[in-house]
Image (cartoon, helix red, strand yellow):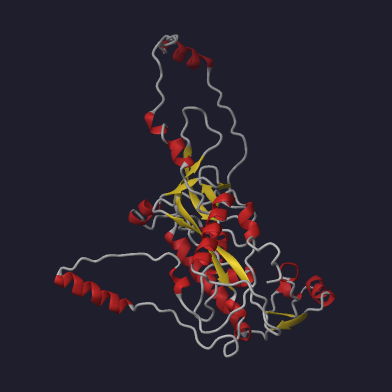
Amino acid sequence: VEKQLGKSIKSLRSDRGGEYLSNEFRNYLTDNGITCQLTAPGTPQQNGVAERMNKTLMEMVRAMMSYSSLPDSFWGYALEMAVYILNRVPSKSVPSTPSELWSGHIPSVRHLRIWGNAAHVLRTDTDKLEPRSEVRLFVGYPKEMKGGLFYRPEDQKVIVSMNARFLEEDYVLDHKPSSRHVLEELKGVSTSIPSALVTPQSTATRIADDAPKQVVPRRSGRVVRQPERFMGLGQSFEDIPDVLESDPWTYNEALKYRDAESWQKAMKSEIESMDTNQVWDLVEPPSGVRAIGCKWVYKRKREADWKVETFKSRLVAKGYTQKEGIDYEETFSPVAMLKSIRILLTVAAHMDYEIWQMDVKTAFLNGNLDEDIYMQQQEGFIAKGQEHL
């Protein structure tokens, strides 16, 4: 908290768990000037926020475990996945997500997948005729890198991979609460080496005499064709889009992306639209007036197969720094009610009218403001020689 947000922790409220009452932990709090607040025995309501969150997490874990075929030992992975999800969804009390409040960035949820779902994961250590993928179970996301965590019951190992194709539709349609005997942990596995069986020599001799003569193999002259079922598998993994790659949040971050040229074209198109609609004039702000800031908002518009269709860059003013009654009087968005649209479509269908649809590019720039708003110049497009305007 102190290093990432520059804020200090003043107090820590907890129950009377042993991890909070140890001398080492209490000395750490004292050395850092943090006061310790303990709840009374048997009164979880004194720390209601944390206790209620624990209940919510455990309810999610139970639901995830009951829907999957993973053993109970994977409850830790399910708990981390539940925390990962809750940090990326808003609540009734707070419209913003916890991740957004922490970092200031709106998180993406497009990469979320069903926990415990099967997926074809690309193999990197295969021979020429071996399958290019193997079926593993999705168990979460790693904290240190991009990708997903995948578990294979055969070797009981969890790996990280960016190349996977999930079988969510098959999983939902064919799902049946199965028993967990197949995926249960191996308990009490003996590691002793079995003793060799000693058989009488006469038995071995009799078996050898009765065995058929060994046929010596010969080299075939037939050309071996590679199985067709493996031909397109490698290409299918190359076509998997990088859905885990988030959109840039800042101007400098956009220039560091591999799509930097596309983002620059999108920003240039946005500035040209601003100039065409005569959105602003470069002036020196009056005395006592503080110009508000602005920032770039980046978004990839994708097609149905997740391939990027267009790159969108929007220049927005930081209106949250304005004060109501001083900088503006009212705010509204002229949006048609869904009920009105349905009535219009119903009348058109009844009268057999033709309906035409159109899209106005940067339509919001055509509005007129009643107030004079002074904004700083946009990053990356500051007019040379007029930096003070």
Residue extending farthest to the right is 31
Q: How many marks?
A: 0
Q: Is residue 132 visible?
A: yes
Q: Quadrant of the N terminus?
A: bottom right
In the rendered view, tell whether residue 169 sits above or below residue 371: above
List x then y, in percent, for residue 370. 51, 84
Along the line of sight, the residue nearer the viewer: 234 or 138: 234
Along the line of sight, the residue nearer the viewer: 117 or 239: 239
Along the line of sight, the residue nearer the viewer: 380 or 339: 380
In the rendered view, tell whether residue 315 sits above or below residue 154: below
Using the rendered view, name the quadrant where residue 53 is placed.
bottom right
In the picture provided, is 105 more to the left or to the right than 70?
Answer: right
List x then y, in percent, for residue 179. 41, 55
Residue extending farthest to the left is 351
Q: In the image, what residue occupies the spot 45% across and 53% down?
A: 117
List x then y, in percent, for residue 188. 58, 48
In the picture provided, is 212 more to the left or to the right than 293?
Answer: left
In the rendered view, tell whether residue 176 sits above or below residue 52: above
Q: Is residue 143 visible?
A: no
Q: Quadrant of the C terminus?
A: bottom right
List x then y, in percent, for residue 176. 36, 56
